[in-house]
Amino acid sequence: MRVESPRAPYPILAGAGLLREGSAVAEAVRGRHALIVCDRHVARLHLAVLDASLRRLRPDVRIALHVLPPGEHEKTLDRWREVVDALAALGATRDATVVALGGGVVGDLAGFAAASWMRGIDVVQVPTTLLAMVDSSVGGKTAVDLPAGKNLVGAFHPPAAVVADTGTLRTLPPRELRAGLAEVVKYGAVFDAGFLDWLDAQADALLGGDDARLAEAVLRSCRYKAEVVARDPFEHGERALLNFGHTFGHAIEAEQGYAGAADGLVHGEAVAVGMVLAARLSAALGRAPSADADRLEALLDRLGLPVRIPAGLAPERLLARMRLDKKADAAGLRFVLWEGAGRGRIVRDVPDDAVLDVMRASTASVGADA
């Protein structure tokens, strides 16, 4: 698969064994320097394989490694600075390549470092989580978080290539696999109700790690995203549909201090809750059937994902977080809602009271104070 971008078309390759075989990554490195960036968990599992493959196939390239601590809370300007300093120590030139090996945190952070170094060098995205394979590695959005909100500092910087070794999914903890499935569900929610039917039918196989079903889910998800990114590379219009559930989800993550798996929801889990809230808000505004929201909630619950706001998060605080979200503009809050399964819509001027009522109904069910 090839994706059109403002810079140049780039390939998306998916399949088992791509890291060990190595040629897809090696061919995407065009210069004399390469910096492989990953976190400690991924380094233990996959770094040696990729490093050995790249050195075997590209002995002409000077390769350096930079290993970060794991976790969403590490996606900061300080960690970005470390990657930039590593590029400086490598002597990286304008034709250097950053290889982002890992999940969405590493992909976003390393991609932003590549966008910043010498006003932009190549990045090759090598996602090792399902969520990164179907979402963050494709499309060129890179960023770091601030205490005020998620992904507030970043750049659009399309990759030179995306190389998704689906064999790495076998090393994912079950919770991370489920979190990735939330982003897969998103594509059906906004683009294709039939895909939701397929996911419902294949839920057990997907949760069981079936290679063929997971590969199909990755490729279908990437195709949906590639098509909308080609039409709207800088999110001036319909690409915003990919943020279904994210306005609520990002607010939950920010209010939890990006605690992640230790003390809060990971990104995909927060998006799952956000999608249910967006569907409920659509129904409350008379834009979509309540039955479709029920169906979405049931599918996410079957996939082992949360569907309610965690206890202790006040709706008023979450609404304040949303006002700092990138999807807000001068006209006020902008939500990605739907007119039913497979029919996402961008909606402006949503009344605050309607948003608060939907969140209060969600938190009340888990005993949080409204």
Image: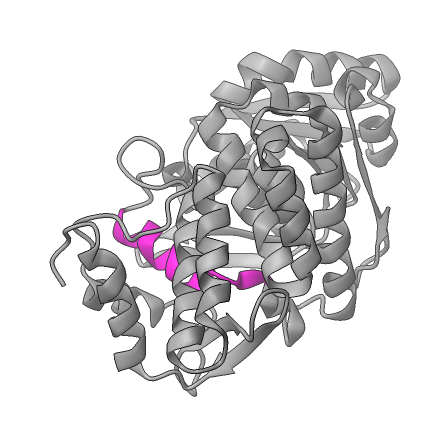
Examine the structure image and report whether residue 268 is included in the region drawn in magenta: no
Place of residue 3 in the rendered image (x, y in percent of width and height, measured from the top left): 82, 54
Q: Which quadrant, please, contains the C terminus?
A: bottom left
Q: Residue furthest left?
A: 369
Place of residue 167 in the rendered image (x, y in percent of width and height, measured from the top left): 70, 21
Place of residue 297 in the rendered image (x, y in percent of width and height, measured from the top left): 44, 53
As drawn, 312 above or below 362: above
Q: Tell me if 174 is positioned left or right of 318 in this view.
A: right
Examine the structure image and report whether residue 251 is included in the region drawn in magenta: yes
Q: Residue at x 77, y 69 (%)?
A: 231
| Residue 102 appears in the picture as rendered | no
As drawn, 247 above or below 124: below
Residues rendered magenta in the picture = 242-256
As drawn, 265 above or below 170: below
Foreground residue among 61 and 205:
205
Place of residue 143 in the rendered image (x, y in percent of width and height, measured from the top left): 52, 52
Q: How many callouts does the rendering have?
A: 0
| Residue 348 appears in the picture as rendered | yes
Q: Quadrant of residue 76?
A: top left
As drawn, 148 above or below 125: below
